[in-house]
Image (cartoon, grey):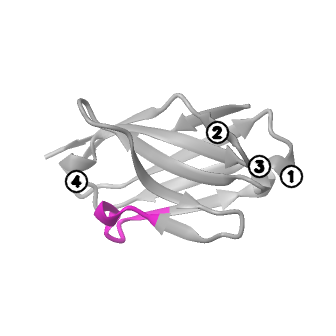
Amino acid sequence: VQLQASGGGLVQAGGSLRLSCTASGMILSMFSGSKMGWYRQAPGKERELVANMTVGGTTNYADFVKGRFTISRDNAKRKVYLQMSNLEPEDTAVYFCNARYYTSNYWGQGTQVTVSS
């Protein structure tokens, strides 16, 4: 299983980015049966949950998201997205895609998001 995240970049405060994560090596039933999520890690800080979505479509967001981010998934394409709006300099971090399938836990390589003030 490989998770390939993309869509990061440099954006000014108040701007938007859309992150994508593509899962390869996962048959449809495995992907659709996985809880998919986005985490982030800023320099010197621990990795933290940004948002996740259960198999049934229930979403969970970190408090700091404050309605600015939206997670979505396309099972047929084996993709998960993170639409980020009204970005703040504090959102600067490496963003990681995560898939949890029963007891298995998979991570992508991360994509850098930098928000300038």
For the residues labelled 3 and 1, say whether their Cβ atoms are less than 8 Å apart: yes
Question: Mark 4 belongs to which amino acid?
Answer: Glu
Is 9 left, or right, of 23 in this rendering?
Answer: left
- Which residue is label 3 attached to? 31
Distance Cα–Cα, label 3 vs label 2: 12 Å
Camera-nearest residue between 16 and 111: 111
Q: Is residue 103 left or right of residue 113?
A: right
Label located before the other in sequence (3 or 4): 3
Q: Amino acid at mark 3?
A: Phe
> What residue span does the magenta drawing correspond to?
61-70
Number of the label disc, if any, that sits on residue 105:
2
Q: Nearer the viewer, residue 36 or 101?
A: 101
Q: Are marks 1 and 4 in contact (CB under 8 Å)?
A: no
Q: What's the distance in space between the residues labelled 1 and 4, CA to CA?
A: 36 Å
Total numbered labels: 4
Provide the residue designation for mark 4.
88
Give neighbour class at mark 1: few <14, some 14-19, many 20+ (Cα, 10 Å).
Answer: few
Residue 65 among those drawn in magenta: yes
* Numbered disc 3: secondary structure: helix
Tell me the residue at 64%/35% (across/down). 3
Which kind of residue does numbered mark 1 sit on?
A: Ser
Q: Which mark is residue 29?
A: 1
Foreground tag (2 vs 4): 2
Provide the secondary structure element on which disc 1 rests.
Answer: helix
Coordinates of residue 19 in the picture (x, y in percent): 49, 47
Q: What is the spatial separation of the Cα atoms under label 3 and label 1, in whole angstroms?
A: 6 Å
Instruction: Give whichever of discs 1 and 2 has the lower sequence position.
Output: 1
* In the depicted structure, whether residue 75 falls above or below residue 94: below
Q: Amino acid at mark 2?
A: Asn
51 or 85, which is in the foreground? Answer: 51
